[in-house]
Amino acid sequence: MPVRRPIHAIALTRDGAALVARLAREFPGAKALAPQRFAAEVPGVEGFAEPVRAVIGRLWPEAGGFLLVMAAGIAVRSIAGLLDDKARDPAVVVLDPRGAFAIPLLSGHLGGANALAREVAAKLGAVAVITTATDAVGAPAAEVWARDHDLGVADPAGVVRVNAAWANGEPVGLYVHPELGCPELGAELDPHLAWRGSDPARAQGFTGALIAVSHRLATPENAALVLWPRCLHLGVGCRRAAEPERVADGVRAALAAAGLAEGAVADVASVDAKADEPALHALAAMLGVAFRVFPSAELGEVDVPSPSARVSRAVGTASVSEAAALVASGGGELLLPKQKDAVWTLAVALGKQAGGRLPRDAEERT
């Protein structure tokens, strides 16, 4: 997957300045930078006077990637104090001033540095020097596969265990919870898997590095890596001006009691009358998902197990939580019927397409 923009191409020498100018032309939107005395000689190159470490530090927070035309040692020392997390750090690729080699230095997989290095190599006629272990043996990278299928990672340490197994030629298995209804998930990984299936007993007996894709808290005890599909749609209602912490704590406790993973939540949904409810916005923000609302007339057409005449009089539909969960799920299955306390109600539906992203119309209603 190509690295996200913007890209900054930074050089330290005269030859390097010419190369970053070319890179900026090859990558629309990229910015070329070099020391002022060299930048003045090359059109399209922005000059800088401060140390390169300061330049990179200034650009780092918003950068998608860096093409650093300099010695690898200088690049390493320049970025060392900026590193945060492999899921957030930008891609960093180092090149020699002649553009003969492109070496991914940081965020090879999730940040896209490996792909960026290959793209640079193709444009310059260079050699991409890829050093990540899984790429070296032609194996997939667990974090990239998870990202491409919108699967949340429960514990990053599990990614290391699975990738190490692939790199060392050890068996890797994939278990997909049967409730998800997607038995073909991971079929493209079959050449690299010793087993793939939805049988809990087979999964529990697997002796290699097991990847478990599940929306449930209870997963095979031997799972090396647990991945959460974004498939749980929360229908939530609450009293006007309800305390956000009480709603969030209650909803989280109800999910845990039902054995459902917060990491598998796709969105929070409610009736349009609650579009401005702070507690529901806060809940969605806490879970890191979209907050969606639906017209009361649309929710009123949904057949639910727990309709309420009182709710109908208040907001124009006999169900908020159950109906909103089902509508948000695209006609999925109600996993958790209405739960409630004095200030909130919750229902959970399982979406039809586990591991998928929000449909376009859902994003537009966010």
Image (cartoon, rainbow, N blue to C red):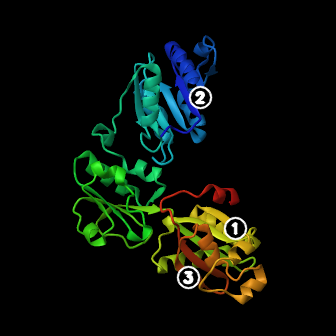
Mark 3 or mark 2, which is nearer the start of the sequence? 2
Image point (57%, 68%), residue name: 329
Location of residue 35 (image quadrant): top right
Pointer 2 with pointer 1, Cβ within 8 A: no
Q: Left or right: where does residue 111 sit relative to residue 170?
A: right
Mark 1 or mark 2, which is nearer the start of the sequence? 2
Task: Determine the CA span between mark 2 and mark 3.
Answer: 51 Å
Q: Secondary structure at mark 1?
A: strand
| Extreme residue in the bottom direction | 309
For residue 337, which numbered disc appears in the image? 3
What amino acid is labelled 1 in the image? Answer: Val
Of residues 32 and 216, the one drawn nearer to the viewer in this rendering: 216
Image point (66%, 67%), residue name: 282
x and y percent of residue 51 in the render? 55, 26
| Extreme residue in the top direction | 41
Pointer 3 with pointer 1, Cβ within 8 A: no
x and y percent of residue 30 in the render? 59, 28
For residue 194, which numbered disc appears in the image? none
Task: Determine the CA span between mark 2 and mark 1.
Answer: 39 Å
Q: Nearer the viewer, mark 2 or mark 1?
A: 1
Instruction: Give the residue number, with chain letter if any, for mark 2.
Output: 30
Instruction: Give the residue number, with chain letter if any, for mark 1.
Output: 293
Q: Secondary structure at mark 3?
A: strand
Image point (39%, 58%), residue name: 185
Q: Tell me, yes or no, if residue 42 can be seen here.
A: yes
Task: Determine the CA span between mark 3 and mark 1.
Answer: 19 Å
Q: Secondary structure at mark 2?
A: loop
Q: Residues within 10 Å of mark 3 (few under 14, many from 20)?
A: some
